[in-house]
Image (tube, rainbow, N blue to C red):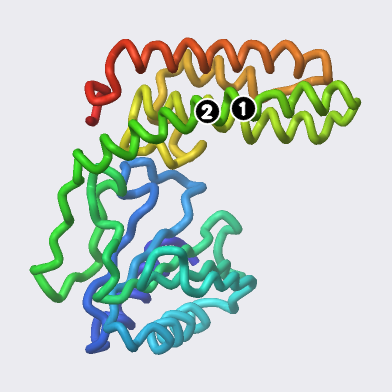
Amino acid sequence: MNRDMVLDSMSRTLMPLGYVHALWEGGAISHGRLDEWSDIDLYVLVDDDKVREAFDAIEGTLTSLSPIAIKYDIGQTPYPGVHQAFYRLERTSKFLVLDIAVVTQSAPDKFLEEKTHGKQMFLFRKSMDLHPPVLDVGDLRDKVRKRISRLRLRMDLFHVFVQKELNRGHLIEAVDAYTVIVLGSLTELLRIRYNPVHHEFKTRYLYSELPLDVIKKLEGLYLIKDSEDLELKYVSARQWFDDVHGEIVAIGPDRLVGL
């Protein structure tokens, strides 16, 4: 089973259903980054009271193609009106995981805004009224300004957790604090510097959205050999954070590319 066969079957099954209004693919393909390791990110727009029926139809289609090897049911996500489940089929590549979101018509966020989610690839769309919303730049500016301030406070207050655990000889906890607090804050600040629209994407799409020299430098900070190496990189990462924060302040948060 390949990608096209799965998509074709899903489309043919779901299109005739009256309560299903659209089916589209997002993820890598919507950003022009599809490759042989990409999964399938599908969105199914349905009537508010038809979420369970939609998943039944989806799973019926999948089992007609292949036994389902793994199902990971998220259920209701933090996004109102969005329900999600992951599937891996026995007869597909282990990389071809299906990430399926059933989205109700009343859901306020349907993941269609193009600057954030890319250009969605519709397999069918019964209503032409389903238009992608326009990014609220003012709201994004406010969010990014607040996030820059919060990242500064987070780094200043919590970076000492790394040294604290190194002092105790607790390397695992030191590495965890370094990765989550120091590198997590640095990575998000770099995203704000180069592509603030995706500042919340953590490490996703980093290799496509950050300059190559920045990526290589960041890779070096993520790779830790031992406690001595961690101490050195801990200092370097904090200094880089300070430098990038200074650049952003000098440029002005509202003048960053994309804002």
**In the drawing, does residue 207 fall left or right of residue 197?**
right
Q: Is residue 146 left or right of residue 185?
A: left
| Quadrant (top left/top right/bottom left/bottom right) for the C terminus | top left
Label number found at residue 186: none
Task: Say what amino acid the circle numbered 2 marks.
Answer: Leu
| Residue 61 x/y as whole percent | 44, 82
Disc 1 on helix, strand or loop? helix
The residue at the point 55 percent across, 77 percent down is: 66
Relative to 1, is 12 above or below? below
Q: CA distance from mark 1 to mark 2?
A: 6 Å
Q: Nearer the viewer, residue 168 or 134?
A: 168
Mark 2 sits on what residue? 153
Q: Considering only vertical position in the picture, is 158 above or below 139?
A: above
Q: Kindly identify the residue that appears in the image at 43 percent across and 17 percent down.
A: 245
Image quadrant of residue 217?
Answer: top right
Where is residue 240 shown, x and y percent of the image? 53, 13
Badge 2 crowding class, 10 Å Cα cut-off, few under 14, some 14 to 19, many 20 or more, is few
State the image coordinates of residue 218 (x, y, percent, origin top left): 56, 20
Q: Residue 76 appears at what percent x and percent y?
A: 47, 73
Quarter of the view holding residue 229: top right
Q: Nearer the viewer, residue 70 or 36?
A: 70
Q: Amino acid at mark 1?
A: Leu
Residue sitting at the far right: 169
Of 201 and 128, the residue lying toward us = 201
Q: Residue at x 37, y 41 (%)?
A: 33
Which residue was labeled with disc 1?
157
Is residue 247 toward the left or the right of residue 229 in the image? left
Which secondary structure lies at badge 2? helix
- Relative placement, left or right, of 177 versus 203 is right
**CB contact under 8 Å: marks 1 and 2:** yes
Looking at the image, is 98 positioned above or below residue 248? below
- 63 over 81 or under it: above or below: below
